[in-house]
Amino acid sequence: MTDTPGWASPGSSEPPRDDARPPADAPAAVPGPSAPPQGTPAPGRPGWGQQAPGGPHPYGWGAPQSPKPGVIPLRPLGLGELLDGSVATIRKHWRTALTLSLGIAVIEQAGNVAANLLIKGKTGAATQVTIMLASMPLTVLVSVVATALLTMVVSRAVLGQSATAGDAWRDARPRLLQLLGLTVLTGLMSGGVVLLGFSPWYFYSTGSAGASGTAALLFLVGFLTIPVGLWLWIRFSLAAPALMLEKQGVLTALSRSRRLVRGSWWRIFGISLLGEVLTFIVAMVIAIPFRFVGLVLGFSDFNSQVDVNSAADQPTAMLITTAIAGIIAATLTIPFRAALGVLIYVDQRIRREALDIELARAAGSTEPGTAGWGDQSGRTPARR
């Protein structure tokens, strides 16, 4: 992806690789000497106002179909197309996507099991929070690697190109340290706000026994910081794709995400939240049978399953069984979540910067209507 045109941000210093693009008000034209005259439909394609052979066109009467070199059509995308494109990426490039996510899931679950075995309920009521904090460094590291590698796989899938794990690693490796810094920075800004808000409750709960009313009040204070964390999470949710695909620096990527999200926060929040809900449902559907098997085989008992404070005291066999379920679930959900994030980024750039023109060129598309929509380096009208 490093040599593929179309991902550079507007106004970047990267020299143009194609001829100058026409201004936004210029009529669309098809490159090449064989292009038909303006207003004349291409051979085999209906003109405007003419019905397509075989019935109405799926996108309107006589409207030219958007090019689709890869997993998505190159035009502003709806919710269904974003979800379908994420699934199509996994289905068409399953060998690379699932192999990468499987390796990452194994490492992450091994770290969770190790944290459970080391802590073993020693922190009392806050055991689960302590386990989460102990495993967080490994979780962040594998998340960075997953984001970097799968972003490259998805970006090629958009153009109809395949990528091996080696290709993804070679493309992503130069940006890994920057992505790690970006992930830590965004985590401190969004998750850090929530963590800071819940810190008084956490330390009060792990200390000597205190009044339940005080603990409830401190928990409420922490809960009120969640909306702030969510706002920051969405505001900078597109920074990682911008850093990886536009070869931007950390601060520039944060600024790019802020500009791309502006005016579309609720839409991006809704799509992202739906993606998280879907991945949670998939994880639960996979985890429940494994927990049931563990109960039947006597790995654990029902009381320990419903008591959150005794979760870390489960037998090792039950922890391993749960980890296997987590590996299977993560193998399926990690690439879906990564693909959805990249496609949201692509969709926002298509809507605001007419990125579909550059992607069509990069994919070698010469479909009518793929050029002349506006200069990306200028002020391109947003398309909603």
Image (tube, rainbow, N blue to C red):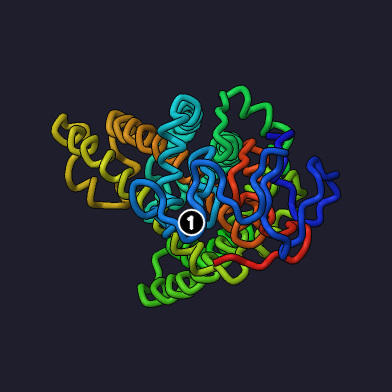
Is residue 37 shown to the viewer in this render?
Answer: yes
Horizontally, is 80 left or right of 341 in the view?
left
In the rendered image, residue 145, in percent from the top left (x then y), is placed at 59, 36
What residue appears at the point 68 percent right and 43 percent down from the top-left corner?
Answer: 245
Name which quarter of the figure residue 383 lies in. bottom right
Local secondary structure at mark 1: loop
Foreground of the two, 72 or 141: 72
Horizontally, is 325 left or right of 336 in the view?
left
Q: Amino acid at mark 1?
A: Ala
Q: Which residue position is annotated with label 1?
A: 63
The N terminus - image quarter = top right
330 is higher (above) or lower (below) than 267: above
Horizontally, is 54 left or right of 249 in the view?
left
Foreground of the two, 45 or 63: 45
In the rendered image, residue 191, in percent from the top left (x then y), is placed at 56, 59
In the rendered image, residue 363, in percent from the top left (x then y), is placed at 62, 37
Estimate how packed mark 1 is, as few (under 14), some (14 to 19) or many (20 or more) residues with alpha carbons within 10 Å.
some
In the rendered image, residue 251, in percent from the top left (x then y), is placed at 76, 56
